[in-house]
Amino acid sequence: MKLASRMGLIGTETAFEAAARARALEATGRDVIHLELGEPDFDTPAHISDAASRALLDDKMTHYTAATGIAPLKAALVADVKRWKGIDTTPEQVVVTPGAKPIMFYAMLALINEGEEVIYPNPGFPIYESMARYVGGTPVAAPLREANDFRMDVAEVESLVTDKTRMIVTNSPHNPTGSILTDEDVREIARIATERDLVVLADEIYGRLQYEGEPLSIATLPGMAERTITLDGFSKTFAMTGWRLGYGIVPEWLAPSFSRLVINSVSCTNAFTQVGAIAALTGPQDAAQAMRTEFIARRSLIVEGLNAIPGVTCVMPHGAFYAFPNFSSFGRTSNQIADHLLYDAGVCGLSGTAFGQYGEGHLRFSYANSREKLSAALERIADSLAKLERTGQLVSA
């Protein structure tokens, strides 16, 4: 039996593979500090879980829902994106999905023809490139460079646009670097999109974890509402990764296509979890704010700690919960350093190349872990790298 040839085009998300290696190492008795997964280490706020529990146990919400989401959640999302993003939209433009990844997939499926180009940030979330290639498109990397604070260079983005370009993907705050686009960056990307008749997939999943200033949603700019797909969800802001709840705000002309894609793929999103999502949006926000405040403290701890290690440099991230330190001075590849730190130091991070070729020289550490664990990880990393410098010997599986 043979796989379909298209399976050779699809990639993966390396964080889960790294986590599996770390768990296998733990099974041998080793202690491992997990800095690989982009998952808040907080529990979902109780009022959210309670609302979902009541919907399941008391209201028996165990049946199909409307394909693109229940009406009360869509209404809550319309109000929420107006409050937090400034986006004017309608319930008909809201598409609720099991996790935010389907929004990426549906955008590519609905809009990208064979050979059409998708400009995406590199390093960046690997699913952008994977999905563009899988649907027959051509992913075009827009390099993010440390010298530019890992922001998209909008002049370079414009130079990458060709007659085959169909879509630009943006992600701010950014995974894996924690960078943010400035307002001027966003306005320039909007100008490029309108002048060249492009669609923008704006991944704003970390929008409420921007630590300085207020994020500018590109869909609010003149002429952009009809050409922007805004992606967001509940995983990061409300510590709801396992709930699998995401959503998109899509142009009116595109919404029917998204609805058909939902029906053909997942039918609908779990009913009682959507009730939990309503509670997340309309209930107390103090837990989400406390989590954000804690991430800011952890950011300082890990960045200062990394910069204190000889041979390591780390720019200050401005959002999300990732540090993207530079290990290139050690003369080893990112994969080699990541493996060495896992098997020698018991610290699991991700190679920068898990996010694309322009991540070489870097590792991604998630600081969604306790300050105690982060401090211990920094000590282990420093000791392991000092030993590597003395002996020249890499440790691997």
Image (cartoon, grey):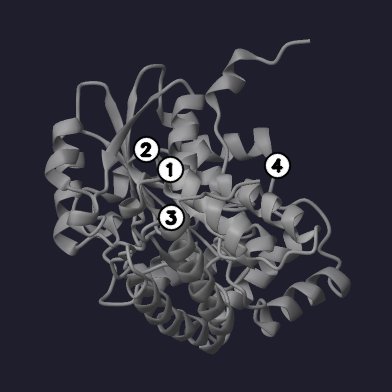
Residue that lies at the very extreme toward the top in this rendered image: 1
| Vertical position of residue 69 compared to residue 48: above or below | above
Residue at 46 percent across and 79 percent down: it is 295
Q: Which amino acid does label 3 sit on?
A: Leu
Distance between the alpha carbons at the discs numbered 3 and 2 = 12 Å
Distance between the alpha carbons at the discs numbered 1 and 4 = 35 Å
Image position of 250 (left or right of 257): left
Q: Residues within 10 Å of mark 4 (few under 14, many from 20)?
A: some
Q: Where is residue 144 in the image (x, y as percent from the top left)?
A: 27, 48
Residue at 75 percent across and 80 percent down: it is 50
Residue at 22 percent across and 60 percent down: it is 149
Kindly identify which numbered label has been placed on residue 363: 3
| Vertical position of residue 384 compared to residue 21: above or below | below
Q: Name the residue under label 2.
A: 357
Q: Which of marks 3 and 4 is nearer the N terminus?
A: 4
What quarter of the picture does the N terminus occupy? top right
Q: Which amino acid does label 1 sit on?
A: Thr
Residue 255 in sight from this viewpoint? no
Q: Earlier in the sequence, mark 3 or mark 2?
A: 2
Q: What element carries label 3?
A: strand
| Vertical position of residue 315 compared to residue 106: above or below | below
Kindly identify which numbered label has been placed on residue 267: 4
Residue at 68 percent across and 56 percent down: it is 22
| Between marks 1 and 4 in the image, the one whose residue lies nearer the viewer | 1
Q: Which of marks 2 and 4 is nearer the N terminus?
A: 4
Q: What residue type is labelled 2?
A: Gln
